[in-house]
């Protein structure tokens, strides 16, 4: 996605590894759907590919895998010109996982040294076209801002930085915010989510984060037994009740962006 999708609400979730970023991305999708803000396109941009597990769906193909297939086909001279692009587009469409009220596309492994640049450009273009068909898009990034820096997206409606409540975690918020500015990543609003909070965080620490980042929202999520059981026992976050404390606080985030009920489309 080279730029913002007209008509789509794009939410990008980032943070360092191990802070619960993917669980929060899945919960945001859950809450959008719960409030009839659907269909949602879930984009798993983390090579570790955990978002599908949190959402309870299976991924058979990834966009990265499509790129590698295209590289092999090009090396063997099996496809050229328009035929090559059509083949790429078809295979990307096949990698889309369809579910009730949301679809999922997994980016898989990122391009590396000697990347197949033609395929990467086509991939980004096609993913942009796919995302434009959805009123809501939630992007689960790998740790840091790598996918944003590769220009999968350049402009998002809401950038969410997730951190844990440790001193290091709170400092990471500032570093990611500074990195986003260096990369000229544009967003309309910024929210900071501090996850797994077990004790009160001093108001001055929160004020310092707000001052350093300009975050419009700082959301504190409690360390929640129900969510821990989802992770440990493989339950979908979609099964969490509306009165769950984490669910209720995330509603404060998504309700800002829920515009109206959208009918289910055919992908």
Image (cartoon, rainbow, N blue to C red):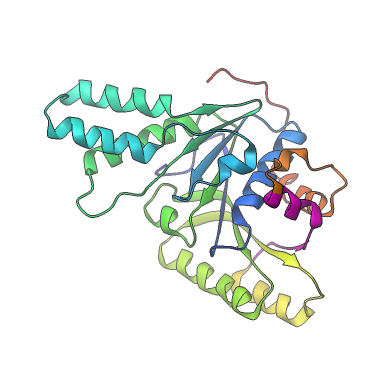
Q: Is residue 124 visible?
A: no
Is residue 233 covered in magenta?
Answer: no
Q: Nearer the viewer, residue 159 or 55?
A: 55
Extreme residue toward the right, this view: 243
Name above or below for residue 63 compared with residue 169.
above
Q: Position of residue 67 (x, y in %)?
A: 30, 37
Percent across and percent down for residue 89 are 34, 26
The image position of residue 246, as x and y in percent, is 79, 54
Q: Nearer the viewer, residue 57 or 126?
A: 57
Residue depicted at 54% across the width and 54% down the height:
187
Q: Quadrant of the N terminus?
A: top left
Q: Nearer the viewer, residue 226 or 232?
A: 232
What is the x, y in percent for residue 17? Answer: 54, 63
Image point 54% across, 65% down: which residue? 16
Q: Is residue 12 left or right of residue 150?
A: right
The stretch drawn in magenta includes residue 216: yes
Question: Could you tell me which residue is drawn at 47 percent across and 51 percent down?
Answer: 48
Q: Which residues are magenta?
A: 215-232
Name, please, the residue furthest toward the top: 266
Position of 257 with respect to 222 (left or right) is: left
The answer to whether residue 17 is seen in the rendering is: yes
Residue 33: name its quadrant: top right
């Amino acid at each position: 996605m080279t730029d913002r999708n007209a008509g789509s609400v794009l939410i990008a979730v980032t943070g360092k590894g191990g802070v619960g970023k993917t669980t929060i991305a899945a919960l945001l999708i859950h809450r959008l759907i719960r409030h009839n803000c659907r269909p949602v396109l879930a984009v798993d941009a983390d090579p570790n590919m955990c978002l599908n597990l949190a959402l309870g769906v299976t991924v058979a193909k990834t966009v990265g895998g499509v790129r590698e297939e295209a590289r092999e086909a090009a090396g063997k001279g099996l496809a050229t010109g328009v035929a090559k692009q059509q083949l790429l587009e078809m295979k990307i469409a096949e990698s889309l996982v369809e579910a009730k009220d949301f679809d999922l596309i997994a980016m898989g492994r990122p391009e590396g040294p000697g990347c197949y640049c033609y395929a990467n450009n086509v991939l980004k273009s096609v993913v942009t076209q796919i995302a434009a068909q959805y009123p809501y898009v939630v992007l689960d990034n790998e740790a840091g801002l790598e996918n944003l820096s590769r220009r999968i997206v350049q402009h998002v409606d809401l950038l969410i930085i997730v951190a844990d409540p440790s001193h290091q975690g709170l400092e990471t918020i500032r570093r990611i915010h500074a990195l986003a500015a260096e990369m000229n990543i544009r967003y309309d609003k910024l929210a900071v989510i501090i996850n797994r909070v077990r004790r009160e965080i001093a108001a001055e620490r929160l004020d310092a984060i707000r001052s350093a980042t300009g975050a419009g929202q700082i959301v504190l999520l409690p360390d929640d037994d129900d969510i821990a059981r989802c992770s440990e026992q493989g339950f979908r976050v979609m099964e969490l009740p509306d009165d769950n404390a984490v669910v209720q606080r995330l509603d404060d985030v998504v309700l800002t962006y829920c515009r109206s009920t959208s009918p289910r489309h055919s992908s």
